[in-house]
Amino acid sequence: MKFLRTIFRETDETGPAGSQVETGPDPVMAALAELEVKRLREALAAASPPPAREAEPEPTLPTAIARPSRVVKAKAPLPEGVAPPSRGIWDLEGDDAPLPAAEPAVSAAPPRRPTRTKTRVLGFESQPSAVVPLFDSIESPAIAPAAPAPGKGYAMFPAGWLVVKDGPGKGASFALSQGISQIGRGLDQTVSLDFGDMAISRRNHAAIAYDPETHAFYVGHGGKSNLVRLNGHPLLATETAADGDEIQIGETTLVLKVLCSPEFNWSSFEAEGDGHDMAIA
């Protein structure tokens, strides 16, 4: 205690005499200095460019999240002598299954037409036989050809003929018999002028008739648009035709050749049993 009292006493004695009052800095000057420092910092910051900002790395997902994969569990080895259990089809996993084969590329070329493959078996070719048959094949007797039918225009006891004098079919002749004979391009016509003259109608362009009672010929038109001319004059009504008269239809000219007349006709032989004017075709 005495020691402490001595120290305190010395302190009290030396304190007020040896101590100097220290004065702090002027607050006005301190504020001005602080403002000057702040101004200098702002000027430096405005003059110098800001430091380049480093590019932030792109966030990468963990492998387990970016690409989910199957966790393969390690299987403990089986003890010796123990066979592994059989696996069913439901135990196969997606990764263990074989990948499907890639589809072949389709070529742009057009598909070729499939060709027929010919197979040839060796040893089965037909060989000429050297065996002579015991019985010759009996040849079937040849069928005798039928007698030709009378040609078109063929008639028994004709009364006259129409002959193509000029135009397509020049030289063709057609026999006329009792009754009406139609003239046209059709094959069913008595006088079938199917020689290429398209101005002639197919059926009944004109008609010529033989009257067995008067033994005279008459010519008439069939009412077609193309005119029928008798000796150069339009045939507008039925007129009598004589030997040598010409009938013109289109580009075809027909001439009438008369056989039966009042002087000669088939009915004059009726008393002998041969006379009639009926055509037997």
Image (spheres, rainbow, N blue to C red):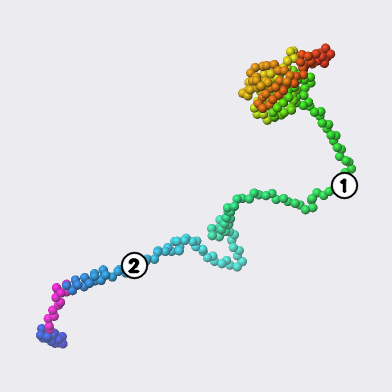
Q: Residue at x 53, y 58 (%)?
A: 94
Q: Residue at x 69, y 49 (%)?
A: 116
Q: Is residue 71 magenta?
A: no
CA separation, marks 1 and 2? 111 Å
Q: Of the residues shown, which amino acid type is indicated by label 2?
A: Arg
Tag on residue 53? Answer: 2
Question: What segment is highlighted magenta in the picture?
Answer: 19-31
Question: Residue 257 or 55: which is nearer the viewer?
Answer: 257
Left or right, residue 195 beside residue 98: right
Left or right, residue 154 beside residue 31: right
Q: Residue at x 58, y 67 (%)?
A: 79
Tag on residue 131? Answer: 1
Where residue 5 appears, as percent x and y from the top left, is 13, 85
Q: Main secondary structure of the magenta part?
A: loop
Dot 1 falls on a residue whose secondary structure is loop
* Mark 1 in CB contact with mark 2 (< 8 angstroms): no
Q: Residue at x 47, y 60 (%)?
A: 68
